[in-house]
Amino acid sequence: MDKEFHEVTAQEADENRPVTMEVATVAPAGQDASETARMAAHSTAEGVAEGEPSSAERGLPARAARSVLALTVALLAWLVPGLGHLVMRRWQRALAFLVAVGGLAVSGLLMRGNVFHLHSQDPFGTLGFLADASSGVFYLLAHAFEKAGPDVARAMGDYGTRFIAGAGIVNMLGVCDAYEVARGRRH
Amino acid sequence: MFFGHLSHFSAMLLFAALASLAVGFLARRTAANRIRYALWTFALFLFVSIAIAWILYPFSR
């Protein structure tokens, strides 16, 4: 087993706890856990026999709620880098993504990199738009940071273009991670 | 302005540092392991960049 899983401190345990929406089955005092499981199975069988929704049907609203929650978290994570992790109380990752994506995007814009727009003339421009737009609020506020406009005739302007695209790609990693954490598939 | 006068190497350092930070915090669970992995990724960025630069050096003239 990987050594890192033995080194989780109390503070980090809170950071790494799973986001769960499960209903726990607890055995009452003086009652055996296997007996509780048997009674639960019996009551489920009774519920199905009397026309009540099965456990699978009862699980649908929970799964739908989790999907909506995950999509909302992903949207927040795209809009403001780190916000998706912040609402799930993953403070460290939230701060890391805000600093990384914000640093890359603002640096790229101050280097006077090119920001691609939706209606580009070529496929590379469309790919550039998708990468740039992935940085969320930094794409929306690009003109506020880059008042003089792009200058890709200089090498630094060309690097700035890559920085802005890199910010979007890094943020997409954060969006995917936040979505997976909200779905309970990742810690 | 500062960002307009970065050298190629310092721009690469800046990109590597910020990208490594995100990768480190994404791939590991504990603070110590995250920092260690971010530093390792940063070192790999530097090593691979310099290696590619030397490989391409004969073709630059």
Image: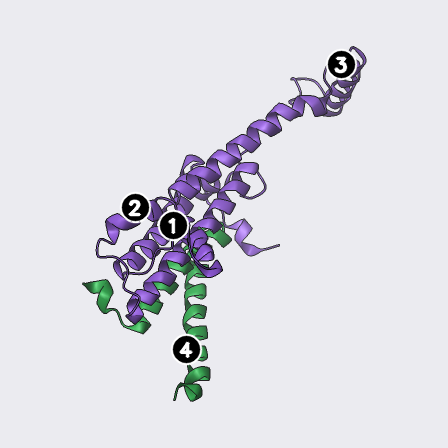
Chain colours: A purple, B green
Q: Which mark is residue A47?
A: 3
- CB-based contact (under 8 Å), mark 1 and mark 4: no
Q: Nearer the viewer, residue B44 or A73?
A: A73
Q: Is residue B17 visible?
A: no
- Marked residue chain, label 1: A
- CB-based contact (under 8 Å), mark 2 and mark 3: no
Q: Residues within 10 Å of mark 2 (few under 14, many from 20)?
A: few
- Marked residue chain, label 2: A
- Marked residue chain, label 4: B
Discs 1 and 2 share one subunit = yes
Q: Is residue A94 above or below residue A150?
A: above
Q: Is residue B36 above or below residue A17?
A: below
Query: In front of the other: label 3 or label 4?
Result: 4
Q: Which residue is mark 4?
A: B50
- CB-based contact (under 8 Å), mark 1 and mark 3: no
Q: Residue furthest front?
A: A121
Q: Which mark is residue A96?
A: 1
Structural distance between the alpha carbons of marks 1 and 2: 20 Å
Q: Which mark is residue A141?
A: 2
Amino acid on which disc 3 is placed: Gly
- CB-based contact (under 8 Å), mark 4 and mark 2: no
Amino acid on which disc 4 is placed: Ile
Structural distance between the alpha carbons of marks 1 and 4: 26 Å
Q: Residue A80 location, x and y as percent?
A: 37, 42
Q: Which mark is residue A108?
A: none
Amino acid on which disc 2 is placed: Leu
Q: Nearer the viewer, residue A130 or B4?
A: A130
Query: In front of the other: label 4 or label 2?
Result: 2
Q: Secondary structure at mark 3?
A: helix
Along the horizontal axis of the image, is A99 left or right of A6? left
